[in-house]
Amino acid sequence: MSVSKLARLAGLDATAFNPSKRVSKDGRERWPSTESISKILQATHEDFDHFMSGDIQFTQIDNSMAGFESPVSKSQGYSVPLLGFAQAGAGGFFDPAGFPVGQGWEEVSFPGGEHNADQDSTYALEVAGDSMAPAYRDGDILIVSPTEQLRRGDRVVVRTVDGEVTAKILYRQTSETLELRSLNPAHAPRTLCMKDVDWIARILWASQ
């Protein structure tokens, strides 16, 4: 089944998932809305948990329907250390580059992640409280990496030299300033001096 046929089956515009709609003019990937994904899951009779597991693929059944089957071999992810936001804000848990230090951390799985040497710096943070709602709520898990290249529009976790840790949207970064937008539209944008930023890590995945 072509992506156009899948879109029509879900009641969407036939061009909704065309290659031209998947990449923006500056080369950044563009993701379907949750509403579009919901309509596809309903049309293909697939449940959300299975879809999010990353353990499915499309397969042709007949000329009008598509289903899912488990591939023979697929990465099931790997484990990364888990820290709380309180630990991230406290001293002694991170090195100057934003990597966790020490051993014996609790671990969680990074779904779909393929482990390699470049990803040894990846780790997870558990959100505490509702200061980052509605985007992230108490108990959500954020998997982050301080080594990933940062681009405008990325969701990031920032720690200041004063120990404040927060999740924001990267708007602009220069050699002197870091401009951030809040995940909560009720909060105003914020600009930090780079000398006041301890580290910044890109959010790769969230457990919502």
Image (cartoon, helix red, strand yellow):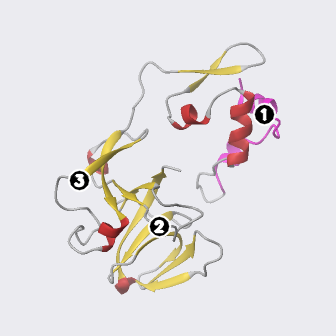
Name the residue tied to disc 3. 105
Q: Earlier in the sequence, mark 1 or mark 3?
A: 1
**Front position in the image: 45 or 173:** 45
SS class of the residue under badge 3? loop
- Whether label 2 touches label 1, CB < 8 Å: no
Alpha-carbon distance for marks 2 and 3? 21 Å
Residue 85 quadrant? bottom left
**Front position in the image: 186 or 201:** 186
Name which residue type carries label 1: Ala
Name which residue type carries label 3: Trp
SS class of the residue under badge 1? loop
Around disc 2, counting alpha carbons within 10 Å, would you say few (fewer than 14), some (14 to 19), or many (20 or more)? few
Position above or below: 33 against 17: below
Percent from the top left, x then y, of residue 59? 62, 19
- For this view, does 99 lie left or right of residue 144? left
| Closer mark to the observer between disc 2 and disc 3 | 2
Name which residue type carries label 2: Gly
Alpha-carbon distance for marks 2 and 1? 37 Å
| Closer mark to the observer between disc 1 and disc 3 | 3
Residue at the image position 16 percent from the left and 55 percent from the top: 103
Name the residue tied to disc 2. 129
Task: Report the disc number at residue 146.
Answer: none
- Magenta stretch holds residue 197: no
Q: Does residue 18 appear in this view? A: no
Percent from the top left, x then y, of residue 109? 36, 42
What range is drawn magenta here? 1-24
Name the residue tied to disc 1. 10
Residue at the image position 37 percent from the left and 59 percent from the top: 125
Position above or below: 183 against 103: below
